[in-house]
Image (cartoon, helix red, strand yellow):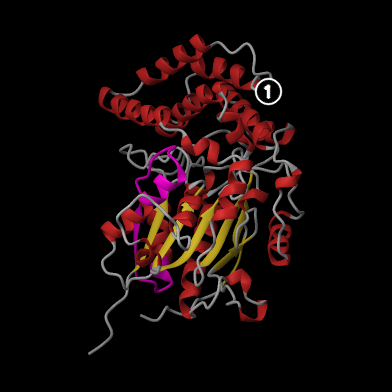
């Protein structure tokens, strides 16, 4: 008799504002479909699930949801499992499979964790983000609700109406001052945005925002100080390969302003991006991680120079995103990499989150997720004896990519990866 077939199970874990359950608003826009195509092309039989997580709940609660989803959907305990987490979703998966983790669940955590082969974190704040420090304040909590609604609205309708965008941009432009913010104005704009949704969709959005308002434990945990504690108590699991995707947005200035074009709405949207970029740029030098030689080489190769402490994607500092092997690094804002970039020719059209001036394209999107698929596939050719970055370079499997690309998305020659043994 032949050996039973193996299906690789890949789980996509949303991050902050993980709106995986808002109907047609898909968090991982086109990621699931394209990643499935890549796996098929690599000879990797795979099934892909999106975890419906809690938007801003604590990391332990979100990590438990990851394990619950695996337990409910895995066909058998023999199928290899690969976890891909975007933003704080990357922390969820790290915590879920950490050795001897203590979570409030009756599941056999160790049994589930033993099936994990790969963890890929995408734009994840492994060393925290200063933006979380702002959102943890009383003023920041108000802005958190507004930013959540802006995100949902733009990804649903394409752009904010000028009657709302102008005052919102003016408010965000004064974030540094933290004074003169009219709460009544924010409430008025909030209500005006909700009115444009259908009755059914409005109820769903209100339920989502209510959940964000009731449980914001995640916010404090994502501060640089909170992540210090997380990293001190959360170890990598031996035998699991850890890789990361790094993003860096354009520093707001003349270049990014010009790239936003002449559309007044795009320019006002860029002002909002500029404001949150400034807040995310405040990573203290003392919180900067110490990079390995391979990690530093990968960053210089992708971006031309080593990103500084202030470099970020509008939400997460670029250096904070480094953990394990650098699978891919690209010029992009925080939501570009999961499919929320401008592509008006696509049907239905892609809508950009904010006008960041990143210039992210479908070509860059495909290069990124192709590299992620290759990283998963290559790891199946050898059994890891220890975490990849703890082994000498001579023992590390070489990543053979089907298509390589630089941070500008320019593809180089294609190379064929041998099919993965079943």
Q: Residue at x 50, y 28 (%)?
A: 144
Q: Is residue 57 magenta?
A: yes
Q: Measured from the top left, where is residue 206 in percent x and y? A: 34, 25
Reading the image, the residue beneath label 1 is 176
Front one among 10 and 138? 138
Front one among 376 and 31? 376
At numbered mark 1, what does the secondary structure look like: helix, strand or loop?
A: loop
Q: Measured from the top left, where is residue 127 in percent x and y? A: 62, 48
Q: Which residues are magenta?
A: 39-64
Q: Neighbour class for label 1 at 10 Å: few (<14), some, many (≥20)? A: few
Residue 350 in the image: above or below residue 181: below
Residue 58 in the image: above or below residue 354: below
Q: Measured from the top left, where is residue 188 in percent x and y? A: 45, 11
Q: Is residue 246 magenta?
A: no
Compared across the picture, whether 411 is left or right of 90 comes to right
Place residue 221 in its image quadrant: top right
Residue 160 in the image: above or below residue 328: above
The image quadrant where one finds the N terminus is: bottom left
Residue 167 in the image: above or below residue 213: above
């Amino acid at each position: 008799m032949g050996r039973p077939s193996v299906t690789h199970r890949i789980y996509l874990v949303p991050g902050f504002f993980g709106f995986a359950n808002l109907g047609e608003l898909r968090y991982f826009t086109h990621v699931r479909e394209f990643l499935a195509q890549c796996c098929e092309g690599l000879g990797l039989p795979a099934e892909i699930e999106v975890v419906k997580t809690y938007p801003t709940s604590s990391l332990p609660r979100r990590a438990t949801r990851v394990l619950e989803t695996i337990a409910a959907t895995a066909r058998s305990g023999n199928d290899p499992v690969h976890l891909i987490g975007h933003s704080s979703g990357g922390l969820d998966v790290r915590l879920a499979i950490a050795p001897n983790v203590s979570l409030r669940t009756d599941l056999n955590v160790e049994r589930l964790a033993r099936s994990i082969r790969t963890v890929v974190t995408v734009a994840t704040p492994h060393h925290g983000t200063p933006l979380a420090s702002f959102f943890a304040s009383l003023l920041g909590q108000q802005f958190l609700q507004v930013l959540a609604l802006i995100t949902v609205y733009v990804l649903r309708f394409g752009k904010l109406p000028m009657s709302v965008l102008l005052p919102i941009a003016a408010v965000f432009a004064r974030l540094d001052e933290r004074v003169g913010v009219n709460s009544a104005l924010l409430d008025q704009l909030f209500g005006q945005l909700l009115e444009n949704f259908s009755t059914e969709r409005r109820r769903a959005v209100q339920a989502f925002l209510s959940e964000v308002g009731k449980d914001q434990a995640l916010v404090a945990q994502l501060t640089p100080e909170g992540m210090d504690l997380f990293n001190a108590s959360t170890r990598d699991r031996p035998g699991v390969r850890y890789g990361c995707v790094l993003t860096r947005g354009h520093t707001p200035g003349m270049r990014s302003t010009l790239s936003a074009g002449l559309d007044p709405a795009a320019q006002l949207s860029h002002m909002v991006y500029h404001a949150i970029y400034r807040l995310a740029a405040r990573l203290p030098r003392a919180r900067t991680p110490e990079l390995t030689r391979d990690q530093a080489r990968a960053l210089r190769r992708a971006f031309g120079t080593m990103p500084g402490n202030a470099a970020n994607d509008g939400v997460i500092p670029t250096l904070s995103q480094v953990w394990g092997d650098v699978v891919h690094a690209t010029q992009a804002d925080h939501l570009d990499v999961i499919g929320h970039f401008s592509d008006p020719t696509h049907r239905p059209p892609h809508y950009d989150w904010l006008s960041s001036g990143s210039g992210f394209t479908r070509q860059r999107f495909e290069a990124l997720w192709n590299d992620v698929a290759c990283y998963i596939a290559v790891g199946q050719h050898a059994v890891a004896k220890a975490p990849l970055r703890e082994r000498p370079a001579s023992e590390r499997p070489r990543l053979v990519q089907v298509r390589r690309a630089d941070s500008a998305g320019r593809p180089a020659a294609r190379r064929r990866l041998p099919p993965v043994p079943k």
